[in-house]
Amino acid sequence: MIVPHLKELRPAYGFDDVAIVPGDVTVNPELSDASFTLGRFRFAIPVLAADLDAVVDPRFAVAFHQMGGLALLNLEGLQTRYSDPGAALAEILSAGDEEATAVIQKVYSQPIREELVGERVGEIKAAGAVCAVSATPANTKRLAPVAVEAGADIFTVKATVTTARHISRSIRGLVLPELCQQLPVPVVVGNTVTYGACKELMETGIAGVLVGVGPGAICTTREVLGVGVPQVTATIECAAARDEHHRETGRYVAVITDGGMRTGGDVCKALAAGADGVMLGSIFAGTEESPGQGYSWGMSTGHAQLPRGTRIHVGVNTTLERLLFGPTSRTDGTENLVGATRSAMGMCGAQTINEFHNVELIVAPSIKTEGKKHQLAQRR
């Protein structure tokens, strides 16, 4: 019997599947520079706060800037639909688990108000912070000029999956090369997970790309659609696209791993896989500074026909300072993420994130369980 050609599956790896190999040279952690560059902006830490209403409002964006990072404000969220988002936020937070998604869908049915876009950007800029904002491709042409005119420093076009070649009914949809030329600010685009799509996006002139489809704690895209690639493999592919694009053009595009990281170890693995920075979401919902008061939900949760997200409760259990820099008494890697990054860099002999890209990663599915009999028993 002749066997027909079968679809072949290639292996792909997430954070729990790999480990970082220590280097032949070590460096004191305080000598490691963990800074992150995006366009003309340089940030002291390689951590971005995701554009979630439960995480980023103007107050949080300013506080995060003061910590050395960059927070994204969602231009299609509660902040631009309500003059006083507090009541809408309270309605979401008080909803029962069974009704939460329906309540979110109702709350997000209110129209986006362009005057509020300018007001929110103005609040962040008035405090002296770098202002980064985001919108979906459908609303980018409308909202980008308003935000930039109000003073936004970085604009992000964000969708579950973004490509440079998109087919639609629109006679003339969003053209990324034109957007990059028209906006006098760095443009970040996401999300993507493959070498080919990422390289084509970089060729449009963008300054950064977001990597990740469905790994977030609040996202259900992988369950609803079955689409996604584990984050380590996705980051490696997109980092390879960045390096090839840099060799061809001399232009460096930042790769930002977006979602799926729960601990400092996961952040370190993303950077070792080739990311220049990481975007975290629900982990920040547990800080005292976040507007979500311990709850988190995704931007796709409010979709009227096919929500691909859910509300989760993480609880308020830390501060922004402790989460990023410590000090901490936790032994599970959920606080002092920047300290963990610098320590891992030092163990691998890397003084910069760029040098950290060259460390060896190995497939090691037992890395978190080997010899951990008593720890595993305590967790049960």
Image (cartoon, rainbow, N blue to C red):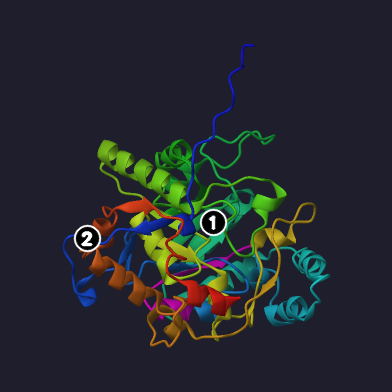
Q: Is residue 191 found left or right of 187 in the rendered image?
A: right
User: Residue 288 colored magenta?
Assistant: no
Residue furthest out toward the top: 1
Residue at the spot 64% in from the left edge and 49% down from the top edge = 138
Residue nearest the observer in this picture, 105 or 319: 319
Q: Tell me which corner region of the image, top left, top right, bottom left or bottom right, holds residue 289.
A: bottom right
Measured from the top left, where is residue 214 in percent x and y? Answer: 60, 54
Cα gap from disc 1 to disc 2, whole angstroms: 44 Å
User: Residue 71 colored magenta?
Assistant: yes
The circle on residue 144 is 1
Crowding near pointer 1: few (<14 within 10 Å), some, many (20+)? many
Count numbered badges in the picture: 2
Residue nearest the observer in this picture, 314 or 204: 314
Disc nearer the start of the sequence (1/2): 2
Q: Which residues are magenta?
A: 61-76
Amino acid tagged 2? Gly
Measured from the top left, where is residue 190 in percent x and y? Answer: 51, 51
> Could you tell me if residue 286 is visible in this image?
yes
Residue at the spot 62% in from the left edge and 45% down from the top edge = 227
Measured from the top left, where is residue 125 in percent x and y? Answer: 45, 75
Residue nearest the observer in this picture, 14 or 92: 14
**For residue 250, above or below residue 51:** above
For label 2, the residue is: 23
